[in-house]
Amino acid sequence: MLSIKEYQTVTNISGPLMMVEMVDQAKYGHIVDIELGDGSIRRGQILQVENDKVLVQVFEGTRGIDVNKSTVRFLARPLELDVSPDILGRVFSGLGEPKDDGPAIIADKRLDINGSPINPYARDYPNEFIQTGISSIDGLNPLVRGQKLPIFSGAGLPHDQVTAQLARQATVLGKGEEFAVVFAAMGITFEAAQFFINDLQDTGAIERAVMFVNLANDPAIERIATPRFALTAAEYLAFELNMHVLVILNDMTNYCEALREISAARKEVPGRRGYPGYLYTDLATVYERAGRIKGKTGSITMVPVLTMPEDDKTHPVPDLTGYITEGQIILSRSLHRKAVSPPVDVLPSLSRLKDKGIGQGKTREDHADLYNQLYAAYARGKESQELATIMGEAALSEEDKKYMTFANEFEARYVSQDYYENRSIETTLDLGWELLSMFENAELKRIDVELIKKYMPKFRKEKSE
Amino acid sequence: MSETRQGRVVKVAGPVVVAEGMAGARMYDVVRVGKLNLIGEIVELNGDLASIQVYEETVGIGPGEPVVDTEAPLSVELGPGLIESIYDGIQRPLNSLVDFEGEFMGRGSSMPGLNREKKWHFKPTVSEATKVAPGNIIGEVQETTLLTHKIMVPAGVNGTIKQIAEGDYTVDEKIGVVAAEDGSETELKLMQKCPVRSARQVRRRLAPNRVLVTGQRVIDTFFPIARGGTACVPGPFGTGKTVVQHQLAKWVDADIVVYVGCGERGNEMTDVLTEFPELKDPHTGEPLMKRSVLIANTSNMPVAAREASVYTGITIAEYFRDMGYTVALMADSTSRWAEAMREISTRLEEMPAEEGYPAYLAARIASFYERAGRVECLGSPERDGALSIIGAVSPPGGDLSDSVVQATLHVVKVFWSLQGRLAYQRHFPAIDWLTSYSFYKQYLKDCFEDKEQGQQMEAMTVKAMGLLEQEAELLEIVRLVGTEALSPADRLSLETARSIREDFLHQNAFHKVDTYTSIEKQYEMLKNILYFHEQSLSAIEAGVETAEIFKLAVREEIARAKYIPQDDIAKVAEIRNTIDEQMKHLQVPNSV
C-alpha cells in the first residue's frame, strides 16, 4: 500500500497557488490535504511537479495558510467521487462532499472525476427526440437524447425559468423510462439555486436529482472541479444504472473565470480576453462527456447555461462553447422586452442533431420541411420588420407587409408560451401550419407539395367537411 | 542492437513531460513515458534533458518514473486494412480498442494500426528477376470492392526480385525477397512503415488540371476545387463547416477519402461511422465506407495526439496517392490543430507570436497544405496521383483576421467563406457567393464531354455571378427608396438573383435527391433559370407587366427542379419548353 506522506515544506504561496518543496514521489494531477495551523483542512490539486518541487492549486483559496505551520498531505490519488445509488436526492458541495443533513455516502465505487474520453467508435448516435413542451425548442431546435445543447443567456434574462421548465417537462415520447437530473451550480446566487431546487421539490423530481452546489460566495477555484463531479455522477447513473440523465450546468461563464484565475496565477501566456489558450480543450473535456454508448440503455443529455458578457456571442466563453456543443439556444433581450417568453431568439439558435431525431416514426413526417419553411418565412419577416423601422410601414410592399405580420404572429403565438404550458409536439407542429396558412401554397417552396396537401389546415378542413 | 536508452522523468506539466538522462536521443523520436507506458514524442532537447509531448493524459505521472526511447520517429503502418478503419491521432485502431479496453479510452495501450491476423490475397504483377526501385508496383491486393490496393516497394529498397509468390498473407508475412547489387537481401511485406512528419517522395510535381466534382452546386459551379488542389472553409460556429466537409466526403469524385476529425465533436464522428456504410457512392453504387479512412481525435482526447492527427491522415492519403489514385483529405478543424500546437508551445515556454500561437504556426500550416498536389508517382509503371486537401477553419467569433485563417488563406487556392447571416436564414450551404473565390474555375468547362456545353457553362456562371452582384447593389437602393423605384428590368434581375440563390445555390444536404447534383444536372438547372430570365426580359421589352411574369406557374417548376432525380434529368431540360409555352400566353396590357 502507498503510505500517505506529510510535508511541512511549503515555500511560497501566491494567489490560489502554493509551492511545496523536497517532496518525494508526487504525481501530476493528484490531490493533497492541507492542514492549517488551526487544524482546519483544505484540499488542493497538483498542477505541476518538477524534481522535488510541487505546485498545488488550493480549491478553497489560500487565505490563512502560512508557510511555517501548514502540513501538506499527499493522498496519492486523483480527485474522486464516492458513488452509490444513494446519491439520488442528495445535495453535495462543489467538491463532492455531502452538504445536506443526510449521512455520508457509503461508496460502491470511487470514480476519478476526470473520467476518460468515450471512444468515438463506441458512441451511439443521438437520435431520440426529447419533447420539452416548448415550441421554439421542439418545433425548431429539437433536443435529442445524448445531445449537449447550451443556453446562451445574458444578465437579467430568464434562463433559470427556461432550464427549470426543461427539467420539469422533458420526456421521450411514449416511454416510461428511468430518468434523473444532475444539477451543478457554479458561482450562481443562493436565490437562483434555490429557485431550481424548489421547482424540483414542487414536482417531486427532487427524489431523482443529484445536486452539486457551489454558490457565488463559495471558493471560486472549487468551481473548476464542480462540473466534473456532476458529470462523474451522471456517467455513473447513465452507464452503470441505465438512467437517462439530464445534466444542467449553471453557469459556465463562472467556471471559465475560475480557470482564468488559475491561469493568470501561473503566469501563463493569455489567449483572448485573458482566458488561457487551452480553454477550448478544457471545455471540451466537460462538454464531450455527454452522449450515448452502444449497447447501454442510459444516456447523458447536457444543458449548460452561460451568460454572455454584454450579450456578446463572440466572447470567448460562448464562442468556444458553440464550437463544441451541438447547437445553442440563444435568449434575446429584445424579445424579452416585448414580453415574449421564453425569449428564444429563433434565427441564431440551432440544434445540430435535429435532423436525425425528427420525422416519421419520431415526431411527424412534415417536421423537417415545416421548420425549414418557418425559419425562411420568419427570417424574411424579420427583414421586413427592420425595413419598416427604417422607412415606415407604409413604404412596405404588400408582400413585405404579409411577412411582417407573420413574424409578429409567430413571436406572439409560436415562440411565446407560459412557463407552465406543456405543448405536445403535434400541437406545436399544427400551430406552425396554422401560421403558414396565411401564405399561398406556391410560396411555401421548402415544403413538399404532398405534405402541404396533407397537413395544411385549408386542405384539412375540406377533407373533414 | 545498442541497449535501449532509458531516462527518468523530472517534470510534469499537463501534456509536457521533461526527462533527464536522454543524451543522444533525437528530435521527434517516439518515447514511452512512465510506468503506464504512455506514448510521447521528443520536441525539445537541452543537454541530457528532453521535453516530451505526451499523446495521453498524464495524471498520475511523477518524477523518477522511467522514459524509454524507441529510437524511431512517429510513423504509420501502411498496407491493406487501412480502408474502413477508424484511428485515433496516432493510428491506434479505435474499433479494436473498444473490444480491448471498453467504451472509454484507456491509457498506454499499444495496438498496431493494421490487423495482424487477417489474410489478404496477394497477386504479383512483376516476375522474378525484375529490377525494382522504391515506388515500383509489385503486386495487388483487392482490399474492398472499390479499391485495388497496389503493393509498392518501400523507400530505400533497390535491386532485383529474387523471389515473389502469389498467395494469402498477413501484412507482416514475407511475400518476396529483393536482392541488392551488393548481395544483401530485403524481405518484402504487404505492409510498410513511414514517418508522418515528412512528405512521401514523388518523381515530379504537376499542376492541377481537372476539377474534383463534389455534387454541391455552389462549389462545382462557382467555386470548384481541383484534383490536387487546396481549399479552406472558415466560418463561425453553426454555419455548417462540418456539414460541408461531410457532404464532400460523401459525394466527392475521388477514389479514396481520408477524413480527419481533429479536435471536434465525438458525435460527428459517430454520424460518419453510422452513415457511410449505408450511403452509396453515386459513381459505383458501393457503400461509401469502402473507400474511406477515418481519423478521429475528438476534442476531449489528448491534445498532443490531436497535433499528430493531421500528419497521420496526410501520410495515409499520400500513400494512396502514390498508387496513382485521386485522394481527398478533409481536415476538420485545422484551428483545433493550431490550438494544440499553441498549447504545447506554451508548455514549452516558447516565445509566443500573435494570439499566443507559436511563431512557426504559418510555416507549419503552409507545409501541411503543400503536401497536396498532383504528382507523377515514384517507380514504375508510370502513373499520376492527386491529393486534394480541404481544411475547415474555426476562427474565434468568426473573425477572418484570426492568425490561422490568415496563414491558411496565404496558401490555399479556394476559399469558401461561410456566413452567419446566411446560416440564420437557413440558406445552406452558407457559402457567401460574393466573398468566396477559386483559382480553378478555368477547368470547369473540361468537366463536360461536349465541349460546347462546357463553354456555355462557363458563360452562364459569369452571367449568374453578374446577376448576384447586381442584386447586392440593387438591394442597397431598395433599402433606401423601396422596390417601386426600380425599373422593370431591375426588378426582374432581383427576382432572377433570388431564384439563383433559392433554387440553385441553396441545397439541402439532408434531402435524398438534393444532397448530390451531377454536373450535367447543375448545367440544366442553371440554364433554366437564365433562360427564364432572358425570355422574361424580351417579354418586358414587349411591354408585359413584371407582376404577370412573376405569377407564371413555371417558376415553381424551376424551383422544384432540384428534387428531380438524376435518372430523370431530361425532365429538367423539358422545363424550358414549359417556359416557352407559358411565355406565349402572356398578354401585353394595351395591345388587346
Image (tube, coloured by chain):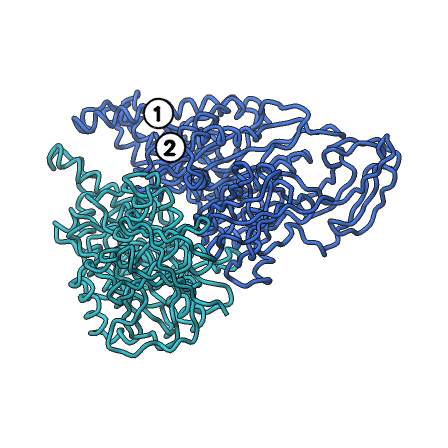
Chain colours: A cyan, B blue
Element on which disc 2 rests: helix
Name the foreground residue: A453 vs A447: A447
Answer above or below: position of B358 versus A60.
Answer: above
Residue A377: mark in rendering = none
Answer above or below: position of B492 versus B152.
Answer: above
Q: Tell me which chain the residue with mark 2 is part of.
A: B
Image quadrant assignment for residue B377: top right
Q: Please, what is the three-letter code of the amino acid marked with disc 2?
A: Ile
Give the percent coordinates (x, y) of residue A203: 23, 74
Q: Please, what is the three-letter code of the amino acid marked with disc 1?
A: Leu
User: Alpha-carbon distance for marks 1 and 2?
Assistant: 9 Å
In the image, is B34 to the left or to the right of A34? right
Name the foreground residue: A343 vs A399: A343
Q: Is residue A73 visible?
A: yes
Q: Residue at x 23, y 64 (%)?
A: A164
Give the percent coordinates (x, y) of residue A355: 40, 53
Name the foreground residue: B110 vs A14: A14
The answer to whether the residue labelled 1 contacts the one labelled 2, judged by CB atoms less than 8 Å apart, is: yes
Image quadrant assignment for residue B436: top left
Q: Earlier in the sequence, mark 1 or mark 2?
A: 1
Name the foreground residue: A354 vs B172: B172
Residue B500: mark in rendering = 2
Give the percent coordinates (x, y) of residue B424: 30, 42
Q: Residue at x 58, y 47 (%)?
A: B7
Element on which disc 1 rests: helix
Q: Quadrant of the C terminus of chain B?
A: top left
Residue B467: mark in rendering = 1
Q: Residue at x 47, y 42 (%)?
A: B332
Q: Quadrant of the N terminus of chain B?
A: top right
Q: Label 1: few (<14), some or many (≥20) within 10 Å?
A: many
In the image, is B113 to the left or to the right of B455? right
